[in-house]
Image: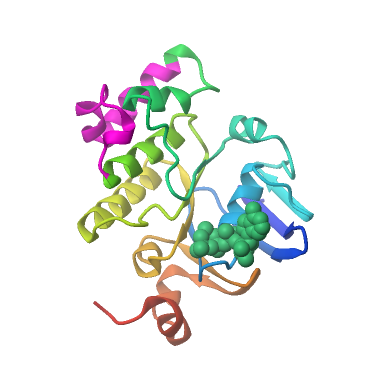
Amino acid sequence: MALLEVSKLCVNYGAIKAVKGISFYVERGEVVTLIGANGAGKSSTMKAIAGLINSTSGRIVFNNSDITNAQPHVIVKSGITLCPEGRQIFPSLTVRGNLEMGAFTVSKASLEQGIEKAYALFPVLKERSKQLAGTLSGGEQQMLAVARALMAEPKLLMLDEPSLGLAPLIVQEIFQLIKQISKLGTTILLVEQNARAALSISDRGYVLETGNIVLSDTGSNLIKDEKIIDAYLGDLN
Ligand SMILES: Nc1ncnc2c1ncn2[C@@H]1O[C@H](COP(=O)(O)OP(=O)(O)OP(=O)(O)O)[C@@H](O)[C@H]1O
Ligand SMILES: [Mg+2]
């Protein structure tokens, strides 16, 4: 069985059907990307997996346990963390304070180890450990958001639009870091508008259109698919 198995997941907001019965899986060790236009249901899917919103129907199984509509802290403890769209760091806490907030499920000893690991992966955060997070640059805030999500030692890290609003050089750096996190043994589910960069580091991808999965393939095939190029990848550059 795959690490994450999502079956026939539906998410409604009142009368709005945001996710309409999607099924997909993520194997241990994979990087998997969901791509899709604005409003396709990408964030809703991630929020439902993280327990931040309830699914209307369907089933989410993680590491052989049914976690459908479980409480968010239970899902974090089971090994899934979400680095949310828009970063949502705590601006009035220091860098270190933000990292501590991400470690609420781990022991004091693991907290210190986690902080050392985060600083090794993101040296800029070590330099700025006492700086208020709200005064970091956009790229530094994104790194902090990813580092915070790693503090709970997830088996599956979900990243919602990690490159949004960042300059091209920083975007490259973020994707290199995601690759590195994957190599260090964390399975990754990624949502991105920057489909080319995301697919280039992904084992597989799913294309979401208005709440339905319309295509799935390997990252390397999707990146060459004419329909995907027209709809999501734009000009080669
Ligand atoms: N809290 C909410 N209340 C009502 N409708 C919502 C809510 N959140 C999302 N929606 C609707 O659900 C649909 C899917 O939204 P979602 O945020 O999942 O899309 P997305 O693929 O993440 O889009 P984007 O690329 O813009 O982030 C949209 O039509 C959106 O308007
Ligand atoms: Mg979104």
> Which quadrant of the figure has residue 9?
bottom right
Quadrant location, the C terminus? bottom left
Q: Quadrant of residue 194?
A: bottom left
- At horizontal 20% and vertical 57% (from top left) the residue drawn is 169
Q: Position of residue 1 (x, y in %)?
A: 67, 51
Does 166 sit above or below residue 154?
Answer: below
Seen from the viewer's position, the closer of residues 160 and 78 is 160
Toward the viewer: 210 or 188? Answer: 210
- What is the x, y in percent for residue 223? 40, 75
Q: Is residue 199 magenta?
A: no
User: In the rendered image of this protein, does residue 54 appear above or below residue 94?
Assistant: below
Residue 40 lies left or right of residue 177; in this view the side is right
Q: Position of residue 135 (x, y in %)?
A: 27, 35
Q: Main secondary structure of the magenta part?
A: helix
At 34% across and 51% down in the image, what residue appears? 179
Q: Is residue 15 left or right of residue 169?
A: right
Depicted 12 relative to depicted 98: above or below: below
Residue 236 seen in render: yes
Kindly indicate the quadrant of the structure image that contains residue 91.
top left
Q: Which residues are magenta?
A: 110-137
Looking at the image, residue 98 sits to the left or right of residue 166; the answer is right
Q: Please check the rendered image and state whether residue 118 is part of the magenta-colored stretch, yes or no.
A: yes
Q: Residue furthest right?
A: 57
Residue 138 position, x and y percent, is 29, 46
Q: How is the image coloured?
A: rainbow
The residue lying at 39 percent from left, 52 percent from top is 162
Image point (47%, 50%), residue name? 85
- In the depicted view, which residue is nearer to us: 132 or 5? 132
